[in-house]
Image (cartoon, helix red, strand yellow):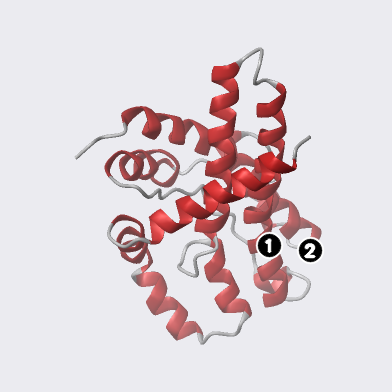
């Protein structure tokens, strides 16, 4: 087995960079929709330490990057109260989509910076380019309909029975491990992220 130590370390560094706007986006949209829970819990901030989950933002992404072709990672969940959100479960869906949406925005920003720094700082530009791919990967990964990922909130918005959702949630962690480490899901998500990054770079003059 070929261990990707450098890639694993870079993925963790980039995940720290990308987790902050992702979780902040959840908190900001929830606040705009009337739920002050994220603000009261100190999540309406761009301080990275407020959004880091040591297992999901450091340990697991390092190990899955090191040992497999996939990648598992997440930040500290932003808690919201559906009863406070305008739109209820529909509002919850908007809050959930805000995180992956921020990853797409970050991918575009990083791509622009990568192009701007390609000649004076080629190594740094390469780091940013990897960030583009990882940011898109995180957007895709977080849309998987498996708790605790953002995509699972869309199941609630689709009015899946809570009992079924709770059963999926109980096995959510193992489902993600199997999907990314054993099946080809991780490979395909990486491929889609790579193609998405190519499209973004192609669109930059």
Q: Mark 2 points at which residue?
A: 33
At x 48% / y 31%, what residue is drawn? 13
How packed is label 2: few (under 14 Cα within 10 Å), some, or many (20 or more)? some
How far is the residue under mark 2 from the one under mark 1? 9 Å
- Between 154 and 201, the residue placed more toward the observer is 201
Q: Which disc, if any, is residue 196? A: none
Which of the marked residues, 2 or 1, is nearer the chain's N terminus? 2
At x 37% / y 50%, what residue is drawn? 70
Q: Name the residue under label 1.
A: 95
Are discs 2 and 1 less than 8 Å apart at CB? yes
Picture coordinates of residue 142 (x, y %)? 53, 58
Left or right: where does residue 73 sit relative to residue 96?
left
Residue 165, above or below 131? below
Picture coordinates of residue 72 (x, y %)? 41, 50
Picture coordinates of residue 15 (x, y %)? 51, 38
Residue 20 in sight in this render: yes
Q: Quadrant of the C terminus?
A: top right
Picture coordinates of residue 165 (x, y %)? 46, 78
Residue 18, above or below 128? below
């Amino acid at each position: 087995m070929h261990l990707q130590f450098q890639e694993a370390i870079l993925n963790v560094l980039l995940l720290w960079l990308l987790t902050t706007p992702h979780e902040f986006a959840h908190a900001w949209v929830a606040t705009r929709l009337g739920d002050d829970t994220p603000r009261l819990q100190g999540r309406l901030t761009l301080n990275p330490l407020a959004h880091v989950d040591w297992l999901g933002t450091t340990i697991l992404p390092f190990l899955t990057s090191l040992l497999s072709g996939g990648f598992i990672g997440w930040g500290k969940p932003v808690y919201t109260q559906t009863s406070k959100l305008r739109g209820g479960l529909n509002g919850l869906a908007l809050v959930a989509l805000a995180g992956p949406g921020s990853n797409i925005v970050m991918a575009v920003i990083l791509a622009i910076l990568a192009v701007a720094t390609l000649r004076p700082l080629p190594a740094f530009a390469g780091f940013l380019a990897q960030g583009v791919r990882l940011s898109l990967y995180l957007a895709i990964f977080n849309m998987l309909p498996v708790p605790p990922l953002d995509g699972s909130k869309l199941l609630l918005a689709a009015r899946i029975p809570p009992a079924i959702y709770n059963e999926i949630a109980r096995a959510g962690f193992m489902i993600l491990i199997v999907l990314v480490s054993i099946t080809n899901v991780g490979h395909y998500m990486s491929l889609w992220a790579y193609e998405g990054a190519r499209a973004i770079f192609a669109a930059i003059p």
